[in-house]
Image (cartoon, rainbow, N blue to C red):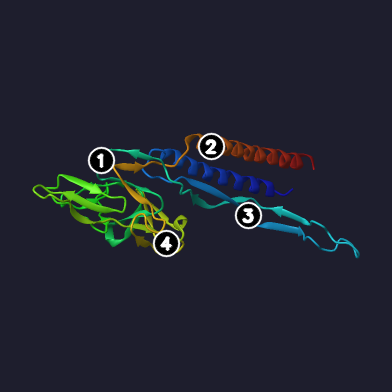
C-alpha cells in the first residue's frame, strides 16, 4: 500500500508550522513602531496525472474530468500587508510619522541605503538627525547645538529656532522614497527594508508630492497588527495542524492493517 498520504500530510504539517511562525512574529511585533504584518501564502505541490482530462475512455468517448492526485502543499511566500498603522502623539519634536505612502531613507553601515517608516529619530553628538541605532537619515540634516526648538513641516522642511535670530533657520528638507513594488522590499530586521530587484529602484521626492505621505511631527506610526485577527488565524492554524496529525495517524493504522491482514 502506498504511503503517499503520509507524505502529503507531512507537507501539511510543515506548511502549518511555518504559518504559525509568521503569526507568532506578527504577535511578537504588535508594539513595534511602524511594523507591517505578514501573511503566509500557500501553494499546491505538483500534481500526478493518472488520467488526463479529455483522454479517450472508449473509442467514442472521452473523460470529462480526468484523475489528478495532489502531492501536498507548501508555503509559497509571505506577503507584507502595507496598510498604515494608527498614528500616536508622542510630544517629541524629532518623532516623525508618514501619513500615507513612502519610506524614510537611512544610511546603513557599509554605505548601503535602508528604508524605514519608523520615525523615532534623535540628535547625535555631532548634531546629525539619526535613527535609534545611530544611522544617519538621508538627506543629512545637521541640527545646531544652540537650537532651542525644531520645527518639521508636512513637506519635510526642517527649521530650527536660534537664539537672537528673529526668523527660523532652515536646516534642510527630508525626502520620502517610494517604490514601484513596495511589497518586493527585502526585510532586513531592526525596522529596515532593503531595495531589491522585485521592488524596483527607489524614487525620492518631497513628502506630500505625487502620492507620497505627509510628515507628521511629534507622532509615531504604530503596528498594523490586529491581535484578534491574529488569534483567530492562530486557532485556525492549530486546528489544521491537528487534522494533518490525525491524517498521519489514520494512514498509519491503515498501513498496519494491510501488513497484518493481507
Q: Quadrant of the C terminus?
A: top right
Q: Disc 2 designates what residue? A: 234
* For discs 2 and 3, the disc positioned in front in the rendered view: 2
Q: Position of residue 72 (x, y in %)?
A: 64, 50
Hey, which residue is sitting farthest left in the picture? 164
Q: Disc 3 designates what residue? A: 45
Instruction: Work out whether mark 4 precedes mark 1 in sequence or the reverse, and give the earlier one.
Output: 1
Instruction: Work out whether mark 3 precedes mark 4 in sequence or the reverse, and give the earlier one.
Output: 3
Q: Disc 1 designates what residue? A: 92
Instruction: Work out whether mark 3 precedes mark 1 in sequence or the reverse, and give the earlier one.
Output: 3
Do the residues bearing badges 3 and 1 touch, measured as CB atoms within 8 Å?
A: no
| Circle number at residue 196 | 4
Question: SS of the residue at dot 1?
Answer: loop
Mark 2, residues whose alpha carbon is within 10 Å: few (<14), some, or many (≥20)? some
Location of residue 261 (image quadrant): top right
Instruction: Work out whether mark 4 precedes mark 2 in sequence or the reverse, and give the earlier one.
Output: 4
Do the residues bearing badges 2 and 3 touch, measured as CB atoms within 8 Å?
A: no
- Residue 11 vs residue 210, the one in the foreground: 210
Question: SS of the residue at dot 4?
Answer: loop
- Residue 69 vs residue 93, the one in the foreground: 93
Mark 4, residues whose alpha carbon is within 10 Å: few (<14), some, or many (≥20)? some
Q: Position of residue 106 (x, y in %)?
A: 30, 56
Amino acid at each position: 500500500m502506498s504511503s503517499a498520504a503520509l507524505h502529503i500530510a507531512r507537507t501539511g504539517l510543515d506548511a502549518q508550522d511555518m504559518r504559525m511562525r509568521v503569526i507568532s512574529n506578527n504577535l511578537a511585533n504588535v508594539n513595534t513602531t511602524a511594523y507591517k504584518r505578514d501573511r503566509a501564502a500557500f501553494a499546491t505541490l505538483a500534481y500526478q496525472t493518472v488520467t488526463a482530462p479529455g483522454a479517450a475512455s472508449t473509442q467514442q468517448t472521452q473523460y470529462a474530468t480526468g484523475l489528478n492526485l495532489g502531492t501536498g502543499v507548501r508555503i509559497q511566500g509571505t506577503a507584507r500587508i502595507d496598510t498604515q498603522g494608527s498614528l500616536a502623539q508622542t510630544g517629541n519634536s524629532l518623532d516623525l510619522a508618514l501619513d500615507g505612502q513612502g519610506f524614510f531613507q537611512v544610511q546603513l553601515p557599509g554605505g548601503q541605503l535602508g528604508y524605514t517608516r519608523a520615525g523615532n529619530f534623535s540628535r547625535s553628538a555631532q548634531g546629525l538627525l539619526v535613527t535609534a541605532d545611530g544611522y544617519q537619515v538621508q538627506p543629512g540634516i545637521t541640527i545646531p547645538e544652540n537650537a532651542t526648538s525644531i520645527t518639521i513641516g508636512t513637506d519635510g522642511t526642517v527649521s530650527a529656532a536660534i537664539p537672537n535670530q528673529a526668523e527660523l533657520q532652515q536646516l534642510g528638507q527630508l525626502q520620502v522614497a517610494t517604490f514601484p513594488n513596495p511589497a518586493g522590499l527585502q526585510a532586513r530586521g531592526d525596522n529596515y527594508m532593503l531595495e531589491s530587484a522585485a521592488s524596483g529602484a527607489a524614487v525620492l521626492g518631497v513628502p506630500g508630492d505625487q502620492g507620497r505621505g505627509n510628515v507628521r511631527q511629534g507622532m509615531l506610526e504604530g503596528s498594523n497588527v490586529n491581535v484578534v485577527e491574529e488569534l483567530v488565524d492562530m486557532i485556525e492554524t492549530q486546528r489544521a495542524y491537528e487534522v494533518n496529525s490525525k491524517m498521519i495517524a489514520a494512514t498509519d493504522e491503515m498501513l498496519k492493517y494491510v501488513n497484518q491482514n493481507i
